[in-house]
Amino acid sequence: MSTTPHDPWTARLHALWRAAFEAVTTRGLSDELYSGLLTLPAVRAVLGARLAADGIASVTRWADHDGLRTQPAGLVADVWAWRAGRSPAGVPVVGEHSLAEVAEAAPALAERLRAAGATEFLVLDFGVAAGERGLLGLGTSAGLPADTSVVAALHQVAEVVVATDQHASQLRELDDLQAQDAILAEASLQMGASLDIDDTLRAVVRIAVPGLADGAAIHVHRDGRMVPIALAHVDAHREPTLAASLRAGQWAGEQVVRGTDPASWDEHPRPSGLPEEARLPQMTISVLRAHGRDVGLLTFFHREGSRRRPDRTFLRNLAGRAALAIDNATLYERRRRDVLSLQQHLLPAVLPDVPGLEFAATYNVADHSLEVGGDFYGLVPQPDGRATALIGDVCGRGAPAAALTGLARHTLETALEEGSSAEHALVGLNAKLLRHDVSRFLTLATATFEPAEPSGVGLTLLTAGHPPPLVLRRDGTVGQPPCSGRLVGVLPELRLRAATERLTPGDTLVLYTDGLTEARDDAGRFFEADLAPTLAGLRGLPLPELLEALVTGGGRFQVGDDAAVLAIRHTGAAA
């Protein structure tokens, strides 16, 4: 057989090699490969098969002069019958068999070859992908021994198939790496975008399925047991089955955790232990460990024969990021609870009863900070029958602000309980802060109520660097008394200017901190300019509902900072 550039087979072979490095799978070479082999001398039929590790043909193709057919009826059984009891040679060798020999092992295959006009069968069994093999057979009519050029052509085609398979495998690996990098980046964004860890982990498993696995689940240690927090299944109809199985402990994850070395968990897929109806017989499991603590498990589930298998490095990378996210969210939640607890201890648990007056208070805690705020309020009944309401705002946040809040409340309330006037109490607190060289300052407002009468109640208002209170009349009119003064803890003289007012039945006094007035709407406007009209529109509400409407910005403004509000309404009763 000639091997000059003008030889048809040589041209075919060159075309096959060019296509080998462009094809994504060997399927793309089928037409060129089978039609090329049929041009060889005396070749009447071509058989091709890809064999799984168990010897079953996963793909079969048959070509003769009537055309190329993929997965023709009965060919899988023919290949199985032919290979039964045969072990592939270490070095691929072309076997040469008469139809009589073929008929002894696989009669249907022999008949198929005879119908194509072949009198002998040349076959090459060779390795392709890991654990898989390729089978190429030629039905010829030239007699045995076979033409050496035809035998050489079989070897050449096998080399093209192997090269194509390797190229396709490299492309898949590159695609997988790119997908994994994208998933890691997206997962990091998801996990960093929110401290609601349950929602975050649900998003992460849905990113991983189906890109990396057919199913996924994340378990977290809670109350001494592993609790499934997030899961996903490539088949949405089977997701409830997966969820129910995990909740009931019908999986092998906990046995794996108890019985094996954690370092080996993510090395190889292992039986999942899930019920058959879940259709996820295998799993790859990784421990979630952060700061030396095991916080949970990351499990990827796989269907039978699935090629979606994330590598060990990726699994450990994703598991590490998820573990840190869980740990950070846990620490954040613990810190948040501690801050809220401390904040509550800086505020009165219950406001005392004062005849003729109704009191209500609320406190909005800023979500963006894990530091205690310095806003506070209180109500102090005094020995002469009067009562003084107070509200304040300490500069800054954190432990120093909390310490000054406690000092200010204790100093003011002690002085008022002993019968001092509100002015005297403010002046005494200012002197104390200056004397002890306290570096922070605060703003304060007070309202001292005379004993209530059915017709009304008189009050004296003071502010020291604090927003003046608002008086909401029963008819909806809103006024702001002209009281003023300097910040507490800055200068020796507060220069307090008091204002007097009288509340008649149904009138309400509202004291608040600047976290309320600094709220903004979508256009960037402050709530301060709209506070009086908003308050007027709320005049008919019970005090708790009125305060709830205020700290939610009247439905338009976002209150993003600490804000305390104290409201006092005259009920029309006498002291």
Image (cartoon, rainbow, N blue to C red):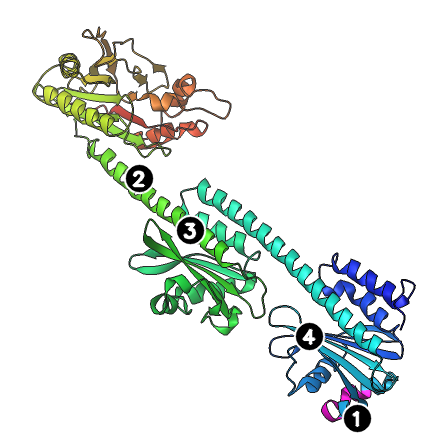
Residue range in magenta is: 104-111
What kind of residue is marked 4? Phe
Q: Cβ–Cβ below 8 Å for labels 3 and 1? A: no
The first of marks 2 and 4 along the sequence is 4
Q: Which numbered tag is attached to residue 100?
A: 1
The first of marks 1 and 2 along the sequence is 1
Residue 337 lies in quadrant: top left
Residue 173's place in the image compared with 70, above or below, is above
The picture places residue 269, in percent across and down from the top left corner, at 49, 67
Front disc: 4 or 1: 4
Q: Cβ–Cβ below 8 Å for labels 1 and 2? A: no
Tag 4 residue: 126
Q: Residue at x 53, y 54 (%)?
A: 208
The first of marks 4 and 1 along the sequence is 1
Q: Residue at x 34, y 46 (%)?
A: 330
Front disc: 4 or 3: 4
The picture places residue 68, in percent across and down from the top left corner, at 83, 72
Q: Secondary structure at mark 4?
A: strand
What kind of residue is marked 3? Gly
Cα distance between the residues tagged 3 and 1? 62 Å
Instruction: Note whether residue 456 is visible.
Output: no
Magenta stretch encompasses residue 96: no
Q: Which numbered tag is attached to residue 336?
A: 2
Residue 228 lies in quadrant: bottom left
Instruction: Note whether residue 147 is visible.
Output: yes
Front disc: 3 or 2: 3
